[in-house]
C-alpha cells in the first residue's frame, strides 16, 4: 500500500467519523446507551443484581461488571453496528455525490475499506462512551477499585467482533443492489436472532469446553456465559437485573487469565466477520445507474413490505376512512387521515387489527397477555416511521408553511401513533380495565410513552431506525425477562409495578415536550 493510498484512506475515514458524529442521532444514541447502562446496573438498595449465580448476587468488581455489561450490551450493539452504519452509500446516490465518487480513480477496495474503517471508528467512539458510563457507575456504586485493563480485555474480546461484523454487513448490503432495501434489513435481523439464540448451546453446570459451532456466534454472549461456568458450578444464572437471596454469600468473579480456547474462538470469529466486507469489494455497484435506481433507494424499507404487496387489495377497506377524515373538522380529521395513510401502506396491519380484536374479544381474560405480545411488536414497527414520513416524502416544508403547521403536524403524528395502538389492542385495554385495572393503566402509560418516544426520536434524527432498533432490542429483552417490572413497558408480561408506571409516564411527558420544543425550534 502506497503512501498516497494511506493518505486517501485516512482522509476518507476522518470524513466518515466527522459526518456520523455530527448527526443528532449520535447524541440520541449516546443518551440511550447511558440510560441502558444505568438501568442494567440496578438500584443499590434493591434485591436486584446484574449478575446472579445460584440465587446469590455477585460482587460489583471490575471483572463481574465488565462481563455483565459486555454481555448485556452485545445484542444492542449488534443492531446498532448495522442500522447506524448502513445507508451512507445510498445517501451518496441520493445527494448526487455518488456520481462524483464513481468518476474518480479510487479503487473499489480502497473505497470499501475506508468506509468500513470509518464505520468501525465511529462505533468505537460509541463503545468508548458506554465504557466511560460503566466505569463512572462503578466508581459511584462499585465494591472495589476500577481495573481498566480488565474492561479493555473483556470489551475487546466480546464486543470488537460485534462491531466488525455489523459494519461489514452494512457495507456489503449497501454495495449489492438487491440488499440495499428491505431484504438487507430483514436478512440481517434474522442473522441477529440466530446469534442470540445460540446462547442456549453452551451447556449447563460446570463446563470445560465449547462446541466448535460457537465460532459463528458473533455477539460474544456465549463467551461470557462460558467464562462464568468455568469458575462456578452453575445451577442457575441470570445476567441482567435478576433477583437474589440476600442470605446467601455473594459470589466473587475474578478474570485472571482468559483461556487459549476462548482466544482462538474469538480470533476465528473476528476473521470471519471480515468476510462480508471483502465480498463487498467485487460486488460493489459503484453507483452505476443500470444497477441501482434512485426510486428504489428512496423507497421506504419495512420488514412487512413483501407481504403488504401481496395484500394490497385489502387496503380498499380503509378508503371510507379517508372520506370520514375529510368530513371531520380540524385536528381530529387530520389524525384520521394520518392513520388512513398508514393503513393503506400496511394492509397487513388491517388484517392484524381485525384478527387481534376478534381473538381478544372472545378469549379468556387470563390469556390476553399472549396476544398482546404480537400486537405490540406490529405496532412498534408500524409507528417507527410515522414521524419521518413527511421528511422522506420531502413534504416537511409544505407542512410548515400552513398556520400552526409544525406543531400540529408533530401532535397529529403522536396522536396517530396512539390511535393505531388503540386500534390494535384497544379490546385488551378495555377488558383489562374491568378485570386487571393495574395492567390496563400500565398498558395505557406504555402506549403513550412509546408514542412520545417514537415521535421525538423520529423528529430529532429524521430516521426510523433510531426508534426501531432500540424498540426491537427492548422487545427481545422484555420477552426474555418476564419478572422485571421496568422491562414490562407495555404490560404483556403482567409484571409492571407502580414505580415503573410512574417512571414511564414521566419520561413520556418529557419526551413529548422535548420533541415538540425541538420541532418548534426547527420550524422557525
Image (cartoon, rainbow, N blue to C red):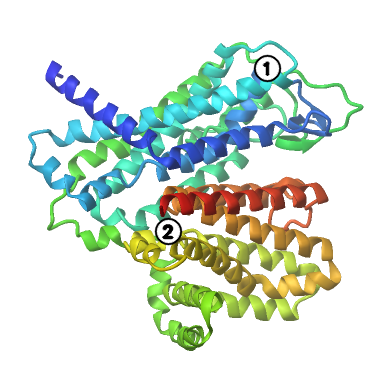
Q: Position of residue 510 (x, y in %)?
A: 63, 48
**Residue drawn at point x = 30 percent, y = 54 percent:** 179
Which of discs 2 and 1 lies nearer the camera? The answer is 2
Frontmost residue, 76 versus 499: 499
**Residue drawn at point x = 48 percent, y = 37 percent:** 27
Q: Position of residue 79 (x, y in %)?
A: 47, 43
Callout 2: 10 Å neighbours few (<14), some, many (20+)? many
Looking at the picture, does residue 297 appear above or below residue 265?
Answer: below
Looking at the picture, does residue 362 appear above or below residue 179?
Answer: below
**Residue drawn at point x = 48 percent, y = 40 percent:** 78
Q: Position of residue 501 (x, y in %)?
A: 76, 52
State how far apart marks 2 and 1 are (Cα). Answer: 40 Å
* Sequence-first tag of 2 and 1: 1
Callout 1: 10 Å neighbours few (<14), some, many (20+)? few
Q: Position of residue 237 (x, y in %)?
A: 73, 34
Residue 388: which numbered mark, if any? 2
Looking at the picture, does residue 393 appear above or below residue 83?
Answer: below
Residue 2 seen: no
Frontmost residue, 510 versus 184: 510
Q: Is residue 214 left or right of residue 522?
A: right
Looking at the picture, does residue 424 appear above or below residue 120?
Answer: below
Residue ranking furthest to the right: 247
Q: How many numbered badges does the structure rendering display?
A: 2
Look at the image and tell me in which quarter the N terminus lies: top left
- In terms of secondary structure, where does tag 1 sit? helix
For label 1, the residue is 139
Q: Is residue 425 left or right of residue 250?
A: left
- In terms of secondary structure, where does tag 2 sit? loop
Amino acid at each position: 500500500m502506497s503512501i498516497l493510498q494511506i493518505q486517501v484512506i485516512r482522509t476518507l475515514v476522518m470524513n466518515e467519523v466527522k459526518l456520523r458524529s455530527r448527526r443528532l442521532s449520535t447524541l440520541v444514541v449516546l443518551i440511550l446507551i447511558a440510560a441502558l447502562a444505568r438501568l442494567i446496573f440496578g438500584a443499590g438498595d434493591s434485591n436486584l443484581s446484574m449478575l446472579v449465580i445460584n440465587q446469590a448476587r455477585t460482587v460489583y468488581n471490575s471483572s463481574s461488571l465488565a462481563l455483565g455489561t459486555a454481555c448485556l450490551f452485545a445484542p444492542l450493539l449488534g443492531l446498532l453496528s448495522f442500522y447506524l452504519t448502513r445507508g451512507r452509500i445510498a445517501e451518496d446516490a441520493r445527494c448526487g455525490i455518488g456520481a462524483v465518487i464513481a468518476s474518480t480513480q479510487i479503487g473499489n477496495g480502497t473505497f470499501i475499506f475506508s468506509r468500513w474503517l470509518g464505520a468501525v471508528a465511529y462505533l468505537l467512539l460509541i463503545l468508548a462512551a458506554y465504557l466511560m458510563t460503566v466505569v463512572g457507575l462503578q466508581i459511584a456504586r462499585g465494591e472495589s477499585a476500577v481495573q481498566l485493563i480488565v474492561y479493555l480485555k473483556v470489551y475487546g474480546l466480546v464486543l470488537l467482533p460485534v462491531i466488525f461484523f455489523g459494519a461489514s454487513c452494512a457495507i456489503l448490503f449497501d454495495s449489492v443492489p438487491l440488499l440495499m432495501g428491505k431484504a438487507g434489513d430483514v436478512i440481517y435481523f434474522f442473522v441477529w436472532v440466530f446469534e442470540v439464540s445460540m446462547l442456549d448451546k453452551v451447556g449447563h453446570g460446570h463446563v470445560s469446553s465449547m462446541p466448535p459451532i460457537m465460532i459463528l456466534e458473533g455477539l460474544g454472549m456465549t463467551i461470557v456465559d462460558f467464562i462464568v461456568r468455568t469458575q462456578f458450578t452453575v445451577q442457575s444464572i441470570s445476567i441482567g437485573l435478576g433477583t437474589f437471596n440476600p442470605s446467601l454469600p455473594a459470589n466473587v468473579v475474578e478474570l485472571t487469565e482468559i483461556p487459549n480456547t476462548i482466544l482462538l474462538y474469538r480470533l476465528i470469529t473476528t476473521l470471519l466477520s471480515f468476510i462480508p466486507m471483502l465480498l463487498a469489494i467485487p460486488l460493489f455497484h459503484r453507483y452505476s445507474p443500470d444497477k441501482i435506481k434512485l426510486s428504489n433507494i428512496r423507497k421506504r424499507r419495512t420488514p412487512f413490505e413483501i407481504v403488504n404487496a401481496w395484500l394490497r387489495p385489502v387496503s380498499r377497506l380503509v378508503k371510507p376512512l379517508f372520506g370520514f377524515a375529510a368530513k371531520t373538522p380540524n385536528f381530529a380529521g387530520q389524525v384520521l387521515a394520518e392513520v388512513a395513510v398508514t393503513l393503506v401502506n400496511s394492509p397487513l396491519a388491517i388484517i392484524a387489527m381485525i384478527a387481534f380484536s376478534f381473538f381478544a374479544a372472545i378469549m379468556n381474560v387470563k390469556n390476553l397477555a399472549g396476544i398482546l405480545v404480537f400486537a405490540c411488536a406490529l405496532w412498534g414497527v408500524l409507528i417507527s416511521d410515522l414521524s419521518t414520513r413527511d421528511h422522506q416524502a420531502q413534504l416537511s416544508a409544505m407542512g410548515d408553511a400552513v398556520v400552526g403547521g409544525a406543531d400540529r403536524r408533530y401532535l397529529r403524528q403522536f396522536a396517530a401513533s396512539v390511535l393505531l395502538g388503540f386500534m390494535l389492542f384497544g379490546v385488551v385495554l378495555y377488558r383489562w380495565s374491568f378485570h386487571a385495572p393495574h395492567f390496563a393503566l400500565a398498558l395505557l402509560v406504555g402506549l403513550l410513552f412509546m408514542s412520545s418516544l417514537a415521535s421525538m426520536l423520529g423528529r430529532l434524527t429524521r430516521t426510523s431506525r433510531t426508534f426501531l432498533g432500540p424498540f426491537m432490542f427492548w422487545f427481545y429483552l422484555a420477552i426474555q425477562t418476564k419478572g422485571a417490572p421496568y422491562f414490562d413497558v407495555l404490560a404483556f408480561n403482567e409484571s409492571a409495578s407502580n414505580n415503573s408506571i410512574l417512571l414511564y409516564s414521566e419520561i413520556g411527558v418529557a419526551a413529548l415536550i422535548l420533541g415538540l420544543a425541538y420541532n418548534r425550534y426547527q420550524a422557525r
